[in-house]
Image (cartoon, grey):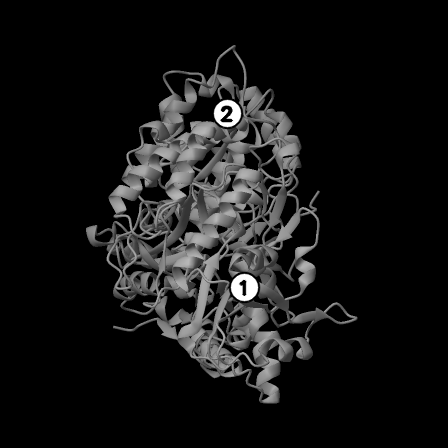
């Protein structure tokens, strides 16, 4: 374990978006194979899965040939784990927007450390290294729940290394609903027209609990140097027909900054430590310690540039659970395999939504144990 | 050329079409013989290379043959049913009369189902008002074009109206239901429940072919026979491939009875080769991403759950064999995912059937055991017990009911003069 721990640290110490795709592929492939070896030693069921893969991972010539796990497998309870119970430092849970059943991932100390480092490295590339006042559009309660941390808490924590001081501007009312604490917000914004600031919130929370109330009251915070980060996806805003352009315009208006200071990033609890912010070209990129493969649903082979398919995320960071090669339930379009105008190397892609949930079809669409005949 | 498939946008179009159809039924009576004459001609016109790749076309051609339909009519409508005559039963005689206009709600996953359903009603002398699922409009239009060419006298075509409209148009579904005297409803649970709840007239007769699953089973004498293994495996693969394993008659699980000290280790690679062969012959052209995801999940879930579990699958989502033991029915996955389970006794899984199993496809070397299984399966709600490789052969009774008779009225006449 120490052997590939050092290798992961070496990859983490490199600039995240500078390596040519082939060079990156070779380095990651070696580590991922070692991680698979390790995982097979640690979990008999996982080993059984890996052993049945049509191609032997030890002879794989590219990351795309390695066995991947559908992300739904991380909904198992107890969670799939490669470490002993005593080594688990934290359990992260996903927001479970679609399925109602959350994913659970267990983090040991090395994975936690790498996760924090990975997120910071990526964010630094997008927003610079400086620490600045940090406004969290959420409640502080998300962070204080023992060893368990939800998706929102994990994302808030991921931005924390860039904070000089943190202010939470939402609270809970008697019914347990989120409410905007206007006093705290006013306090945070006071005399900061010329200050570099950070604002973070889940996309739907920013809209419902910051943009909408401030718009209704005609308030502008006048923070032209705020950098706004948001994540969590658009699903919960679909009902309100809120799309990215409208969201950015209205958010920029209430904060008092330009829309190019808003960065939407994609991240999933199951792939801790890797986030995918939009670059100025509107694309997403994989950092040097991970990769993204977009697979054709018909063949599961990687698609050509310009094509759309199922997203697989790859990361060398997690070693406490099977999160390094995950087939997600998201769809994306590959823009190019290299050469994005923003200068970041490797794949550039754009998300195109969630995979519609598979339902049994036709006259054979029967769930067992549901029909009480006989 | 008349286009029998119309894109519908208003309830009035449906009620207008139904009125014309009813008039056609009222003014002329047609016998099954006359219907079959047109079907024969239609079957010939479908026998062309350009149509060979159409899903279900081979089956449709076979179904439309007189040789297939005559015995069905005779059995369901009586010995004189072919000519539309009265059949004597002691002092009484009976004759089939059409219900009138029969509405059809076929499932969207079986390409030729709109046509199969329609033929059942036409054989009973009815008119057919068929709702075409959106995904089947082009194919249906093409095949119905051949019927138009085969029926210059409009014997059948003036009794047919194919209505293409979106699944979500409740107003059009309701208009259709109000206009019919009978209905044949096919499909999954949600679809069937929605259609059954439509405002049909109180006299309308409904034939419902709802969601079921099917099961394959073999005894050791069959799967262990080196001379027959390959042929059995090809039959199983064929049953799995048709209708992309989405039909109620598609096997979702294969139970293999242990015995004779033989190991299934020799049988399973042959089954795997059969799946590879079938896949090569009939590769998928398209797949919803959600199904691909579900297949990947099923593979992972199966192998993670139990280290005794095995599986065969290629790198794509083309097909999957999940291997283990146990007599419980597994959750169906579809997408050519067959669970193969070893059992000590085939009676064990069959005794657990709960009415959800439509077809039991069998490969048995022991006829006595097969009789025992058939009896138990019938008691446990199975409606069809057939040989493997013939699980989709569309011969009534289907789902335990006839296909033509439910859409006719059997009129009984007892002569008033002694």
Q: Is there any visible trace of residue A220 in the rendered image?
A: yes
Q: Are marks 2 and 1 on the same chain?
A: no
Q: Residue at x 57, y 21 (%)?
A: B369
Q: Most extreme residue toward the right, as rendered? A: A174
> What crowding class fits label 1: few (fewer than 14 Cα within 10 Å), some (14-19), or many (20 or more)?
many
Q: Is there any visible trace of residue B82 in the rendered image?
A: no
Q: Nearer the viewer, residue B205 or A61?
A: A61
Q: Are marks 2 and 1 in contact (CB under 8 Å)?
A: no
Asked if residue B45 is positioned above or below residue B128 in the image, the reply reads above
Report the disc number at residue B157. none
User: Disc 2 vs disc 1: which is toward the camera?
Assistant: 2
Q: Most extreme residue toward the left, as rendered? A: B49
Q: Please state the horizontal and vertical placement of residue A201, each as a whole percent of the image.
A: 56, 67
Subunit of mark 1?
B
Q: Quadrant of the C terminus of chain A?
A: top right
Q: Please state the horizontal and vertical placement of residue A206, each as a whole percent of the image.
A: 56, 72
Quarter of the image where one finds residue A125: bottom left
Q: Please state the horizontal and vertical placement of residue B38, each as a whole percent of the image.
A: 32, 59
Asked if residue B242 is positioned above or below residue B29 in the image, the reply reads above
Asked if residue B412 is positioned above or below residue A103 in the image, the reply reads below
> What crowding class fits label 2: few (fewer than 14 Cα within 10 Å), some (14-19), or many (20 or more)?
few
The residue tagged 2 is: A41
Question: Of helix, strand and loop, which one carries label 2?
Answer: helix
Q: Nearer the viewer, residue A217 or B118?
A: A217
The residue tagged 1 is: B183
Q: Is residue B9 left or right of residue A232?
A: left
The total number of labels drawn is 2
Q: Please state the horizontal and vertical placement of residue A278, each as a whole percent of the image.
A: 39, 64
- How far apart marks 2 and 1 lie (CA) works out to 59 Å
Question: Of helix, strand and loop, which one carries label 1?
Answer: strand
Quarter of the image where one finds residue B128: bottom left
Asked if residue B266 is positioned above or below residue B187 in the image, the reply reads above
């Amino acid at each position: 374990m120490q052997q590939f721990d050092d290798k992961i640290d070496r990859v983490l110490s490199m600039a995240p978006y500078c390596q040519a795709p082939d060079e990156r592929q070779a380095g990651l492939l070696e580590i991922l194979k070692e991680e698979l070896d390790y995982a097979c030693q640690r979990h008999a069921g996982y080993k059984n899965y890996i052993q049945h893969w049509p191609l032997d991972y030890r002879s794989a010539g590219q990351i795309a040939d390695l066995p991947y796990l559908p992300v739904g497998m991380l909904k198992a309870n107890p969670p799939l784990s490669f470490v002993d119970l005593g080594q688990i430092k934290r359990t992260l849970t996903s927001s479970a927007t679609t399925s109602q059943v959350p994913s659970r991932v267990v983090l040991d100390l090395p994975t936690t450390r790498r996760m924090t480092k990975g997120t910071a490295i990526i964010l630094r590339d997008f927003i610079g290294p400086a620490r600045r006042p940090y406004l969290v559009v959420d409640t502080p309660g998300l962070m204080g729940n023992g060893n368990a941390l939800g998706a929102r808490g994990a994302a808030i924590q991921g931005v924390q290394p860039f904070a000089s001081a943190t202010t939470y501007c939402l609270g809970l009312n008697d019914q347990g609903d989120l409410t905007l604490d206007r006093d705290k917000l006013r306090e945070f914004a006071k005399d900061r027209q010329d200050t570099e600031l950070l604002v973070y919130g889940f996309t739907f929370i920013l809209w419902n609990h910051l943009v909408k109330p401030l718009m209704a009251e005609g308030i502008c915070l006048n923070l032209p140097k705020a950098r706004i980060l948001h994540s969590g996806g658009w699903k919960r805003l679909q009902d309100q027909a809120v799309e990215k352009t409208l969201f950015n315009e209205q958010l920029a208006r209430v904060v008092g900054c330009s829309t190019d200071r808003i960065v939407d990033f994609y991240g999933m609890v199951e792939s801790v430590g890797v986030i995918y912010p939009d670059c100025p070209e509107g694309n997403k990129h994989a950092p040097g310690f991970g990769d993204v493969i977009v697979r054709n649903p018909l063949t599961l082979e990687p698609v050509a540039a310009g094509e759309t398919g199922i997203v697989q995320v790859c990361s060398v960071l997690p070693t406490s659970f099977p999160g390094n090669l995950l087939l997600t339930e998201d769809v994306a379009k590959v823009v190019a395999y290299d050469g994005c105008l923003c200068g970041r190397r490797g794949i550039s892609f754009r998300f195109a939504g969630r995979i519609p949930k598979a339902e049994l079809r036709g006259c054979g669409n029967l769930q067992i144990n549901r029909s009480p005949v006989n | 050329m008349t286009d029998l498939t119309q894109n519908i946008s208003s309830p009035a179009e449906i009620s207008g079409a139904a009125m014309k159809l009813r008039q056609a039924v009222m003014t002329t009576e047609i016998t099954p013989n006359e219907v079959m004459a047109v079907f024969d001609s239609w079957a010939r016109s479908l026998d062309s290379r350009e149509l060979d790749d159409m899903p279900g076309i081979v089956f449709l051609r076979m179904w439309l043959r007189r040789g297939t339909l005559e015995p069905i009519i005779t059995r369901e409508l009586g010995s004189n049913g072919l000519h539309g005559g009265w059949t004597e039963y002691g002092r009484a005689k009976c004759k089939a009369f059409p219900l009138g206009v029969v509405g059809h709600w076929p499932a969207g996953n079986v390409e030729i189902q709109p046509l199969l359903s329609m033929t059942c009603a036409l054989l009973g002398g009815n008119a057919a008002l068929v709702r075409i699922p959106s995904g089947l409009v082009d194919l249906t239009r093409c095949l119905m074009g051949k019927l138009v060419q085969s029926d210059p006298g409009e014997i059948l075509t003036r009794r047919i109206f194919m209505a293409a409209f979106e699944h979500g148009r409740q107003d059009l579904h309701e208009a259709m239901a109000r206009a019919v005297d009978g209905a044949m409803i096919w499909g999954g649970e949600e679809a069937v429940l929605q259609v059954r709840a439509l405002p049909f007239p109180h006299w309308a007769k409904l034939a419902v072919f709802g969601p079921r699953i099917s099961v394959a089973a073999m005894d050791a004498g069959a799967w262990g026979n080196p001379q027959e293994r390959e042929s059995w495996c090809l039959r199983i693969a064929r049953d799995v491939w048709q209708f992309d394993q989405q039909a109620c008659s598609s096997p979702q699980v294969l139970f293999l009875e242990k015995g004779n000290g033989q190991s299934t280790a020799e049988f399973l690679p042959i089954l795997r080769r059969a799946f590879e062969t079938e896949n090569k012959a009939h590769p998928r052209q398209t797949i919803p991403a959600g199904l691909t995801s579900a297949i990947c999940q099923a593979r992972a879930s199966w192998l993670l759950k139990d280290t005794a579990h095995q599986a065969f699958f290629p790198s794509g989502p083309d097909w999957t064999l999940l291997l283990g033991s146990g007599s419980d029915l597994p959750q169906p996955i579809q997408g050519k995912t067959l669970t193969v389970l070893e059992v000590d006794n085939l009676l064990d899984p069959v005794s657990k059937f709960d009415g959800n199993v439509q077809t039991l496809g069998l490969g048995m070397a022991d006829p006595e055991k097969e009789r025992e299984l058939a009896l138990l399966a019938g008691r446990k709600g199975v409606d069809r017990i057939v040989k493997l490789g013939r699980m989709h052969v569309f011969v009534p009774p289907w789902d335990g009911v006839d296909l033509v008779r439910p859409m006719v009225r059997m009129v009984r006449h007892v002569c008033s003069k002694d």
